[in-house]
């Protein structure tokens, strides 16, 4: 039997079919993982969202309610809608600032100077921590909060009016938060910068181009394709960050006896759709000019 299979494989199966089978074998573990870990759970959440789900010990009870969970979320319980609006505004305001700052920091970290490794480590720290138990532990001990002592506040009040102290502190907190989100985008842009051929810079300098012209004509076009990748990461990171109130709202709804898993699943689906819409909008807004011209052609 084994011999017949081998003969059939060598004589009857074409090279193209062999390559296709080998390719599918390599992709098969990913397909299995996607179906088991992504597609099935997502399909179950969709089914939950159209039901009133009750859990007793380990047994789920489903009562079909159709679109009632979605109507309740969008029409009655407006707390979720308000938080989603705040999330969209936050993303649309934060994304261009984070991308711009990440490009500037990546260019600075790509230069040769003393202590470059130390500063890279500082900006890549969010990549190491991101979220999870380490971040929760840091946050529980006040690591994510800015608590200024009286001495610092006295120094600030001598430099700026007392009424502007709260504004100054809020701006400072916002800057720290934006810097926290730039970790991965800086890494992406830094990788793109290191792929640029140095001879392009040398030729431009020989032709008399200044640093500003080199940035707009060589550096930015070379790293611009990474903008879309950074936008996807930023939106997903802001959406799933532990401090996002929407995630806390979904978790609270799951544990609420008047809402439970079906209601929380509907909220999660709406939130996912909102994320996809925002990502698509920002992607189409910032995609490469060459891709646009190719699409038109």
Image (cartoon, rainbow, N blue to C red):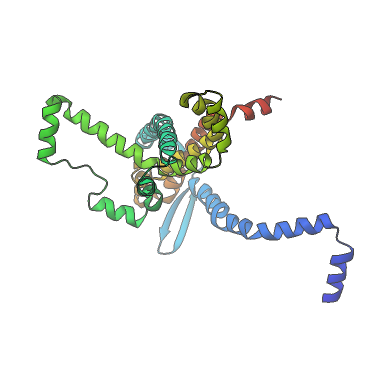
Q: Is residue 126 above or below residue 1?
A: above
Q: Is residue 262 above or below residue 287?
A: below
Q: Quadrant of the C terminus?
A: top right
Query: Which residue is painted at 52% across and 23% down in the image?
Result: 208
Is residue 105 in view from this perspective?
Answer: yes
Mark count: 0
**Quadrant position of residue 225:** top right
Judge left or right: residue 159 versus residue 138.
Answer: left
Q: Which residue is more in the foreground, 148 or 206?
A: 206
Judge left or right: residue 41 versus residue 10.
Answer: left
Residue 165: percent from the left, percent from the top?
17, 29
Judge left or right: residue 37 versus residue 70.
Answer: right
Q: Quadrant of the N terminus?
A: bottom right
Residue 261: percent from the left, percent from the top?
43, 51
Is residue 69 in view from this perspective?
Answer: no
Q: Which residue is more in the foreground, 21 or 107?
A: 107
Residue 76: percent from the left, percent from the top?
38, 34
In this view, which residue lies farthest toward the front? 206
Q: Which residue is more in the foreground, 138 or 78?
A: 138
Query: Which residue is painted at 55% across and 37% down in the image?
Result: 198
**Quadrant position of residue 54:** bottom left
Query: Which residue is painted at 43% across and 33% down in the image?
Result: 95
Query: Which residue is painted at 77% across and 57% down in the image?
Result: 19
Residue 262: percent from the left, percent from the top?
45, 48
Q: Which residue is more in the foreground, 244 or 255?
A: 244
**Quadrant position of residue 103:** top left
């Amino acid at each position: 039997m084994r011999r017949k299979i081998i003969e059939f494989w060598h004589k009857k199966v074409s090279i193209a079919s062999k390559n296709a089978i080998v390719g599918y074998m390599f992709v098969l573990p990913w397909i299995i993982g996607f179906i088991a870990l992504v597609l099935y759970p997502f399909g179950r959440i969709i089914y939950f969202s159209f039901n009133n789900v009750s859990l007793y010990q380990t047994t789920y009870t489903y009562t079909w309610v159709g679109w009632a969970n979605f109507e309740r979320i969008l029409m009655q319980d407006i707390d979720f809608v308000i938080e989603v609006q705040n999330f969209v505004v936050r993303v649309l305001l934060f994304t261009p600032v984070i991308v711009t700052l990440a490009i500037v920091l990546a260019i600075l970290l790509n230069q040769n100077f003393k202590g470059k490794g130390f500063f890279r480590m500082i900006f890549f720290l969010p990549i190491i921590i991101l979220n999870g138990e380490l971040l929760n532990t840091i946050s529980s001990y006040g690591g994510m909060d800015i608590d200024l002592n009286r001495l610092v506040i006295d120094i600030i009040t001598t430099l700026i009016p007392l009424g502007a102290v709260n504004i100054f502190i809020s701006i400072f907190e916002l800057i720290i938060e934006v810097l926290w989100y730039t970790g991965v985008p800086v890494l992406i842009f830094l990788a793109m910068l290191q792929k640029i051929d140095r001879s392009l810079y040398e030729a431009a300098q020989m032709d008399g181009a200044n640093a500003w012209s080199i940035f707009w004509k060589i550096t930015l076009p070379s790293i611009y394709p990474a903008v879309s990748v950074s936008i996807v990461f930023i939106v997903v990171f802001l959406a799933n960050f532990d401090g996002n109130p929407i995630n806390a709202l979904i978790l609270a709804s799951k544990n609420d006896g008047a809402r439970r898993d079906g209601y929380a699943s509907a909220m999660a689906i709406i939130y996912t759709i909102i994320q996809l819409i925002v990502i698509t909008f920002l992607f189409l807004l910032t995609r490469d000019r060459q891709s646009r011209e190719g699409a038109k052609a």
